Amino acid sequence: MSEALPRTLLSLMHDTGIANGLDALGYGEADVSTLIDGTLKQQRLLVNCPRAVGAEELRYVIQQSFKYW
């Protein structure tokens, strides 16, 4: 059941032709540190996260976001 929402969102993204991840937007591995630094500056977005978010957590999320399908 926990996979229902991610599967549905990916399906909607695919069906609507949204860019397939950060790679499709022109970002690459060389941009990861810059993306992490920029994200950490957006504390208004991070404070509502249900768990602590630091550079390593962001690195994982960003690296998983280069391609969705």
Image (cartoon, grey):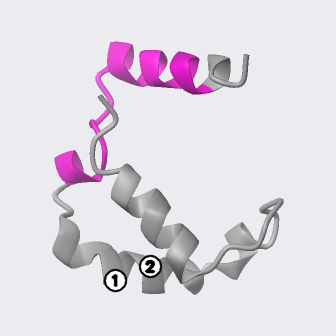
Quick check: 49 left or right of 30? Answer: right
Secondary structure predominantly adopted by residues drawn in magenta: helix
Mark 2 touching mark 1, by CB under 8 A? Answer: yes
How packed mark 2 is, by other alpha carbons closer than 10 Å (few <14, some 14-19, many 20 or more), is some
Q: Position of residue 40 (x, y in %)?
A: 57, 83
Task: Between residue 20 and residue 50, name the one nearer to us.
Answer: 50
Task: Between residue 13 and residue 33, name the one nearer to us.
Answer: 33
Split into 4 quadrants, where in the image is the N terminus?
top right
Residue 35's quadrant in the figure? bottom left
Q: Is residue 27 above or below residue 35?
A: above
Pointer 1: what residue? 33
Residue 57's quadrant in the figure? bottom right
Q: Position of residue 15 (x, y in %)?
A: 36, 13
Element marked by disc 2:
helix
Q: Is residue 39 above or below residue 8?
A: below
Q: Residue 36 carries which label?
A: 2
How packed mark 1 is, by other alpha carbons closer than 10 Å (few <14, some 14-19, many 20 or more), is some
Q: Where is residue 13 in the image (x, y as percent from the top left)?
A: 41, 24
Amino acid of disc 1: Ser
Split into 4 quadrants, where in the image is the C terminus?
top left
Amino acid of disc 2: Ile
Q: What stretch is highlighted in magenta?
A: 6-25
Q: Is residue 13 magenta?
A: yes
Q: In this view, does 6 lie above or below 60?
A: above
Q: Position of residue 45 (x, y in %)?
A: 69, 68
Quick check: 65 left or right of 27? Answer: right
